[in-house]
Amino acid sequence: MIDSSHPHKVRPPRSLSEASLLEAPGLLMRKVRGLSSRTSLTWFACVPLALFILGLFNLSAHAADLPELTPAFLINNLWLSIAAFLVIFMNAGFAMVEAGLCRQKNAVNILAKNLIVFALAATAYWFIGYKIMYNASWVIPGVFKFGGFFFDPTVTAEMVTEGKLVPSVDFLFQVAFAGTAATIVSGLVAERIKFNEFVIFSLVLVGVIYPIAGSWQWNVGEGWLNKLGFIDFAGSTVVHTVGGWAGLVGAMILGPRIGKYIDGKPQAIPGHNLAIATLGCLILWLGWYGFNPGSVLAMNELVPYVAVTTTLGAAGGGIAGTLFSQIHSGKPDLTMTINGILAGLVGITAGCDGFPMWASWVVGFIGGAIVVYVVSFIDSIGIDDPVGAFSVHGIGGIWGTLAVGLFNADKGLLMGGGFSQLGIQILGSFVFSVFTIVTSWIVWSILSAVSGGIRVEEHEEVQGLDIGEHGMEAYPDFVSASN
């Protein structure tokens, strides 16, 4: 900017509108009160440097308090971090399966729910859920914990010397499981639920319902079901049955989608993209190698064994889903192959560390067979489950939990262990189911009463939730004759 009174001098810009790209930052800093002098600007520039030095000092101080990091400490925490990432990536699989098995006009809504649900889960579980499930004191011993919020991420010398998980890694792994429970709900209520009501329910499920139930089993030696001897290694009941029942209650309150029943008879509503549904199934299968082997909570000789039993369970389920869908309907149904694989994975999850390998395949095969007939049964009683989520996760989780009482190498009835373990498994599955049904019904009912119903308006459902709830389309460049 040329100064008119002194043509050879360049006048500093007086406003941001006059400033060049290079002049603007300095001018902006001078506009801030107390930063008009060169000295104050110099001191201000030292702030990031001072914070960096302080951070290094604190890191060094904490490092000085810890012994030398042991190989066991490093490998255990590295493995659990990788396992957590795999389970978190399962959210992509759930999104693809649900979107692919539902209609085009609701694809954006389904993707939005599956994307936001992990953000919600991470927030709610970090705020209170993890504390209730693991870190708080028992208010009712073995039954209910409470006290404060968040968790302490401090790493202690004992964790290093004994190769234990640091709190942050443990939280990351556990929150991935919590998010899975909420994602299961999404499939059951798909294509007709209000977005905001789903969001609120997910927060309550992950922040309160799931942690209370999980504390009964996964507080080793403390939770009342754990002390009783209930076995659920990686969450057939704690994660999948809880998520399945929570979603089923929501589906019952919502009622079936428009067009699902004509003269009382269920009608098929085909999904719009079986290619991405198949991709989602494969992503979930991959993610399960974090879900089950990660639940060993260390890197040892059991990890590869669990990976193999998980693979065999999925394989048996996929074969059974394909075979029994052909027996049931005359032709092999791809959607049943998908759900058969997932049911096999859910079924193997409770006992994958204790099943013989042959039993792992059998458990998965039976789970894949069951899902074919349960999907038809759920339709026949008037409950609309668009993707078969309850059949896969709810019933599949129950079957997997009971299968421990039958096939566990040490305690299973069919392995010479007697009826005791099977009885405990039945009790545990029943208690988790009743607790989830009751608490979910209360939450869904309150949401329905407060919001004037949790279901979208009829015209919005007919048009599609993508436009009604989000104002956009998943495939704006394509026009379909039928949604």
Image (spheres, rainbow, N blue to C red):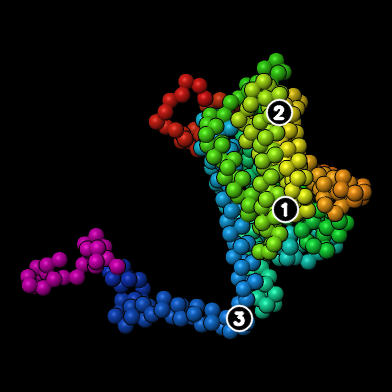
Q: Is residue 132 found left or right of 406 in the rendered image?
A: left
Q: Is residue 118 found left or right of 241 in the rendered image?
A: left
Query: What is the residue that sits farthest to the left in this orientation?
Result: 7
Who is closer to the viewer here, 72 or 136? 72
Q: Which residue is mark 2?
A: 324
- Image: magenta residue range: 1-25
- Tell me which residue sits at (57%, 45%) in the image: 283
Q: Does residue 162 appear in the picture of this structure?
A: yes
Given this view, does label 2 or label 3 mark the residue nearer the observer?
Answer: 2
Who is closer to the viewer here, 123 or 481? 481
Q: Earlier in the sequence, mark 1 or mark 2?
A: 1
Q: Which residue is mark 3?
A: 68
Describe the element under mark 1 as helix, strand or loop.
Answer: loop
The chief SS type of the magenta part is loop
User: Crowdedness of circle 3 by 10 Å Cα count: few (<14), some, many (20+)?
Assistant: few
Q: Earlier in the sequence, mark 2 or mark 3?
A: 3
